[in-house]
Image: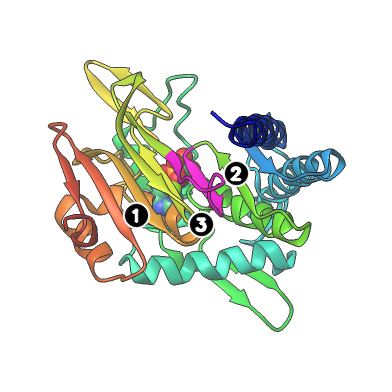
Amino acid sequence: MSRQSISKKRINTQILVILMFCTLAMSGQSFSQWEERSAAIMGTNIRAEVYHESEQLRNQALSAVMMQMEEINQLMSPYIDSSELSLLNREAATRKVVVSDELFYLLALSARLSELTKGAFDITFASVGYMYDYKEQQRPDQAQIDGKLQAIDYRHVQLDPANNSVRFAHHDLKIDLGGIAKGYAVDLAIERLKALGIEHALVTAGGDTRLLGDRLGKPWIVGIRDPRDEEKQAVVIPLESAAMSTSGDYERYFEEDGKRYHHIISPRTGESVYEVQSVSIIGPESVYNDALSTAVFVMGLENGIGLINGLPEFEAIVMDNERRMHYSSGLQQ
Ligand code: AMP
Ligand code: MG
């Protein structure tokens, strides 16, 4: 072997070693450029993961996510006396109440989603729903349900866009945004991340997840849990630049005489619905996914999947009450 070819080989080896070192350094670097944070807000676990070279920006971004969640919580929680939602439930049956742009927007959107879902999604379910306490295992009896059922009707919520005011047209009316507010907060958090220059992120609030970009060349893997075993995943789905929300009968419930009283309520009967155990909706934005997952749960398998098949931007994955999986038409190919 000539001197020349030996030195060439040596140089090649050196280049290879340098390349390997660079790759390792880069992957180590990109790994450390991910940062994650969790917090308990809105009665659920909020988790965010962001990617950016700047550690300062990563921390700023994660703080912005949590601040956004807390802002929506302060406006819309039924458990906070000073929230605008609590104020509406106390006073909107007797006078017009002016609310923030955020709450007004969400009330108007909720009304449109009630129309779209033929009343399956209806924030006035709370007129009866407030009598359930899943932690305390309390539920209304039939007479109590019958006494308030008339109040459930989204058309009783009168919105005046001229001055952001709200008036309830029924004295027993109560509203609750538990089926849509988390998704809305996730979308607002993603907007904040985008404004800060973040291009790869995950934000999840309970069952509502939205992904910004991919996981650096790979999709995010989002799971749907087994409704009867929290350790197990029923399905995992690769997703990027998309969102998925899941509604399940396992999130808040108690059992009595073998019957599961859970938190998704039919606005028609004022009681939990039993046709399915879990509904996941995939679509571009969490606010719609959140409301539609609740709505499809109420509508049941056929009507629910029928609704989603008519909405080109959305897909559904449903587990029925015999644990069979069903998919909307776009997922069947
Ligand atoms: P999710 O976990 O998104 O399915 O939302 C469930 C939550 O939505 C419940 O905890 C209630 O706060 C609320 N909810 C229950 N039933 C309905 C309904 N029919 N329409 C709108 N919101 C509902
Ligand atoms: Mg929902």
**Image coordinates for residue 253, horizontal then vertical, percent:** 39, 26
Q: Are marks 3 and 1 in contact (CB under 8 Å)?
A: no
Vertical comparison of 110 with 229: above or below? below
Disc number placed over residue 203 in the picture, else none: 2
Q: Is residue 280 left or right of residue 166?
A: left
Disc number placed over residue 241 in the picture, else none: 3
Of 151 and 220, nearer the camera is: 220
Q: Is mark 1 within 8 Å of ligand 1?
A: yes
Residue carrying label 1 = 295
**Image coordinates for residue 41, horizontal then vertical, percent:** 67, 34
Q: Is residue 46 left or right of residue 110?
A: right
Q: Is residue 255 left or right of residue 129?
A: left
Dot 2: within a 10 Å radius of its alpha carbon, few (fewer than 14), some, or many (20 or more) residues?
many
**Image coordinates for residue 16, horizontal then vertical, percent:** 61, 34
User: Identity of the amino acid at label 3?
Assistant: Ser
Q: Is residue 148 visible?
A: no
Residue at (58% x, 44% y) in the render: 202
User: Identity of the amino acid at label 2?
Assistant: Val
Rounded to the nearest angstrom, the CA distance separating label 2 from label 3 is 12 Å
Q: Earlier in the sequence, mark 1 or mark 2?
A: 2
Residue at (17% x, 46% y) in the render: 326
Q: Element type at marker 3?
A: loop
Of 214 and 123, nearer the camera is: 214
User: Identity of the amino acid at label 1?
Assistant: Ala
